Image (tube, rainbow, N blue to C red):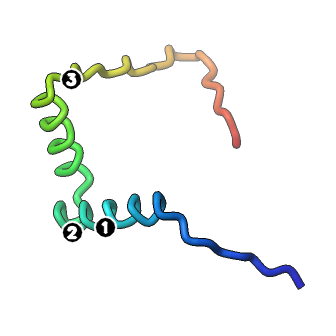
Amino acid sequence: MNTTQTWDDPILAEIYAIRERLVEQYQNDLIAYSQAAETHCRTLGLKIVESPRFVPRAGQPVEVEHA
């Protein structure tokens, strides 16, 4: 019988703890969290760059990658 051995990873534990604090702070509202994160980045002087959206032309095939 195969058994999976688990181990404690302090980095993952910290990531999970931070994620739980953010869920509580923003009531699981991804929009509110995203806006707060963007505001924080701008406060730090970081430049926010958005990727242009791809809009296929009529009749143009769209390729979809499958994992």
Which residue, given by chain and number where applicable, does mark 3 sit on?
Answer: 46
Checking the image for residue 58, the label placed there is none
Q: Quadrant of residue 44?
A: top left
Q: In front: 53, or 7?
A: 7
Up the image or down, 47 lies above or below 42; here it is above
Question: Which residue is nearer to you in this view: 28 or 21?
Answer: 21
Q: Which amino acid does label 3 sit on?
A: Leu
- Residue at 24% in and 23% down: 48
For badge 1, the amino acid type reads Glu
> Reading the chain from its start, which is encountered first: label 2 or label 3?
2
Quadrant where the image shows the N terminus: bottom right
Q: Do residues under tags 2 and 1 come within 8 Å of each other at their CB atoms?
A: yes
The answer to whether the residue labelled 3 contacts the one labelled 1, judged by CB atoms less than 8 Å apart, is: no
| Circle nearer the N terminus (3, 1) | 1
Residue at disc 2, secondary structure: helix
The front one of 49 and 19 is 19
Dot 1 alpha-carbon crowd within 10 angstroms: few under 14, some 14 to 19, many 20 or more: few
**Image position of 18 with respect to 53: above or below:** below
Picture coordinates of residue 17 (x, y %)? 34, 66
Q: Mark 2 points at which residue?
A: 24
Residue 48 or residue 29, whichever sits in front: 48
- Left or right of residue 3: residue 14: left
Distance between mark 2 and mark 3 Cα atoms: 26 Å
Q: In which quarter of the image is residue 27?
A: bottom left
* Viewer-side label of 2, 3: 3
Quadrant of residue 47 within the rendered picture: top left
Give the labeled residue for mark 1.
20
Q: Which amino acid does label 2 sit on?
A: Glu
Q: Looking at the image, which residue is at 65% across and 26% down?
A: 63
- Seen at 61% across and 24% down, the residue is 62
